[in-house]
Amino acid sequence: MPPILQLKDVSTHFPVESGFLFKKQTGTVKAVDGITLDVERGEVLGLVGESGSGKSTLARTIMQLVPTTGGTVVLEGRNLTAASAGEIKTARRDLQMVFQDPFASLNPRLTVFAALAEPLLVHGVVPKAQVPARVAALMEQVGLAPRFMRKYPHEFSGGQRQRIAIARALALEPKVIIADEPVSALDVSIQAQILNLLAGLVRKMNLTMIFIAHDLSVVKHISDRIAVMYQGKIVELGSALDIMERPQHPYTRALISAIPRVEHSLLT
């Protein structure tokens, strides 16, 4: 079967302007610069790179939250870069995103129930009478008790808020999820719980996932393949095993060398 998501020479550039009344473009920031990439069905593709490498901009470009400067994003044969607003809305049922900071991505004025019910009602996934049961099932799916659905985001811990964000992304039963550094703001022990949750959901729901992080030690545990991004470009792509044990690009080797290691002498 063809790849579920295809990026063809995708670029996202931002103008650099100077002046107050009469602005003049003085340069261009090439956040994403000519990326061609296929994402296979059912795989977890890790996207790794340091801050500023363009990972989050690429994620938002795929979601069409940021317009492309050039190239195409194709989801199951649908060219999202040439789609209308209505077509993009329809495509969002198959393509969802989990943002880095759940406290910022969740509306503080909405209860958990309202946040999870909103996509169900907007897209007409289930009849209105069945929404409470569907919300309860979503909460149980991510390891939260349904009795907390009337609480607000600030009443939860960081890990619990990220579970709510994941539940919201799952509400429309998407085929592809983009997880943009979903564990970077969490404690190490909570990171492991969220990683295990995501890995389990991928298996149970036959999801395709793009998992974005700056830490290779996190990415290697969940990814089938890893793409290394540097200055807006993919500089290396391969299986997680090949990338970790046989890196080819100097930047990849630098990322691996930055992974903290515990010396044996410190443990004895």
Image: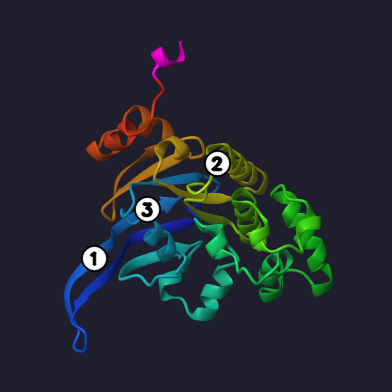
Q: Is residue 266 above or below residue 7?
A: above
Q: Residues within 10 Å of mark 3 (few under 14, many from 20)?
A: some
Under mark 2, the amino acid is Gln
Residue beneath disc 2: 191
| Number of numbered tags placed on the structure image | 3
Q: Which mark is residue 113?
A: none
Residue 215 among magenta residues: no
User: Camera-side residue: 162 or 54?
Assistant: 162
Residue beneath disc 3: 37
Q: Residues within 10 Å of mark 1 (few under 14, many from 20)?
A: few
What element does badge 2 sit on? helix
Residue in the picture at 56% in, 74% down: 89
Residue extending furthest toward the top: 268
**Residue 254 spot, x, y in % from top left:** 27, 36
Residue in the picture at 80% in, 72% down: 127
Which residues lie in the magenta part? 263-268
User: Camera-side residue: 123 or 82?
Assistant: 123
